[in-house]
Image (cartoon, rainbow, N blue to C red):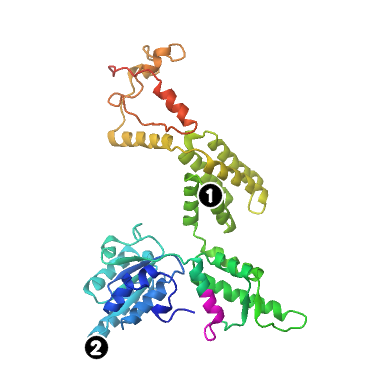
Amino acid sequence: MRPQTLDEVVGQEHLLGPAAPLRRLVEGGRLPSMLLWGPPGSGKTTIGRLLAEAVGARFAQLNSTTDGVASLRDTVAAARDAAELESRTTVVLLDELHRYSKAQQDALLPHVEAGTIVLVGATTESPFAGGITRPLLSRLRVFRLEPLGDPELAEIAARALADPERGFGGTIGLDEVAHRQLLGYASGDARRLLGILETAVTLAERRAAEAPDGSVPSPLPVTAADIGRAAQSATLDYDRSGVISAFIKSIRGSDPDAALYWLATALEAGDDPRYLARRLVISASEDVGNAEPRALPLATAALDAVEKIGAETNDEGLYALAQATAFLAAAPKSPAAGRAFFAAREAVRAEGTRPVPSHLRPVAKTYRNPHDDPSAGSQQYLPRGLVGRRFYEPRDVGEEAAIRRRLRARPAKEQEQPR
């Protein structure tokens, strides 16, 4: 079901629609070296191949995990021959470009710069995260592909079910529940959608063949159970970094529904409940902080509960994770304490350590104990040169608002005292 022309590509209208960037390049008949950046199954490889065909260029494909510098050298030599003998440009699609080492990417540079090849890199990783070297990235135009939405996935599924040559030719029946489940398990990935559908059809055929009469109905019904069994391998493509990022950011954004959804996604994909509980402990301090001091003990208790009760095979252990997730997401937020610490650490690293004020040393006779002297809070506690510096700025939210009021009510600090 791979598209045979650019017009058959479903989705990516912002790149391939009328007057869109890639469409205009094709209409101009000349391609620059580029980077197609997008999630799995969004069409990067297909679009790269079709772009080459649309401008009449030779097409060669390399994979960063299997093809090294030697393969690249052979591909460049063939491209040079095609340019000299046939006056044809060669488009080289390099899958997972971010996996190429710096030396391998450096080997690409002169050929891209000289125009010996038109490089179409494909990557699922942000090109600005460091996986692609700056010199190479500066020579590529970056085009971002979006995950396919349910309407696009539904169109791809409909084509596969109806196409008499490359698909099932109307011999398969998919009810509404199974169809909805298929789109959900695909998670924006056309390749995954087609793989699940194909496996589900095989399971349905096997079930029909094992029926007492052995007859295969037409159209063959594919059930939600078939889709579910076929999708069991979908967790292999679990985007852990993306899901965990969404999980924590949903907590930080005070959206318990989204936080619980991403928690469920991670757990259904087989992620370690203890890892998720540890992330909650971090979020309790980093995001909630002193705005709700009960968050940290609750998150720590959830971690303890998961470790003691278990959660991999026992759903009862998941209640603690759900409780902590909902509480943290709904709680008021303040990162002030953590930010204050890192600001203080930066001051130490940037300015070096400073001597402890003499009245704070263990044998000091001039130290005033606040328990005995109500005015002792005004004495100098920061070292010389930092008196008056504020690291901790409590926010006016939750319990931290009371801390803010108490700190503002403190007596004015004394002037710097001699060492």
Q: Which residues are magenta?
A: 156-166
Q: Identify the mark nearer the N-term, 1 or 2.
A: 2
Disc 1 residue crowd, few under 14, some 14–19, many 20+, Cα 10 Å = many
Q: Which is closer to the viewer, label 1 or label 2?
A: 1
List the residue tagged with mark 1: 259
Front residue of this view, candidates 38 and 78? 38
What residue is drawn where x is 21% and y is 73%? 114
Judge whether residue 165 is colored magenta. yes
List the residue tagged with mark 2: 85
| Image-quadrant location for residue 298 | top right
Whether residue 344 is visible here, answered yes or no, is yes
Dominant SS of magenta comes to helix
Furthest-bottom residue in this view: 85
Furthest-right residue in this view: 212
Amino acid type, mark 1: Ala
Relative image position of residue 140 (x, y in whole percent): 28, 67
Relative image position of residue 328 (x, y in whole percent): 53, 41
- For residue 242, side relative to residue 233 (left or right): left
What residue is drawn where x is 47% and y is 27%? 402
Judge whether residue 74 is colored magenta. no
Image: 327 above or below 105: above
| Image-quadrant location for residue 230 | bottom right
Image: 357 above or below 260: above
Please say if the residues under marks 1 and 2 sit with CB atoms less than 8 Å apart: no
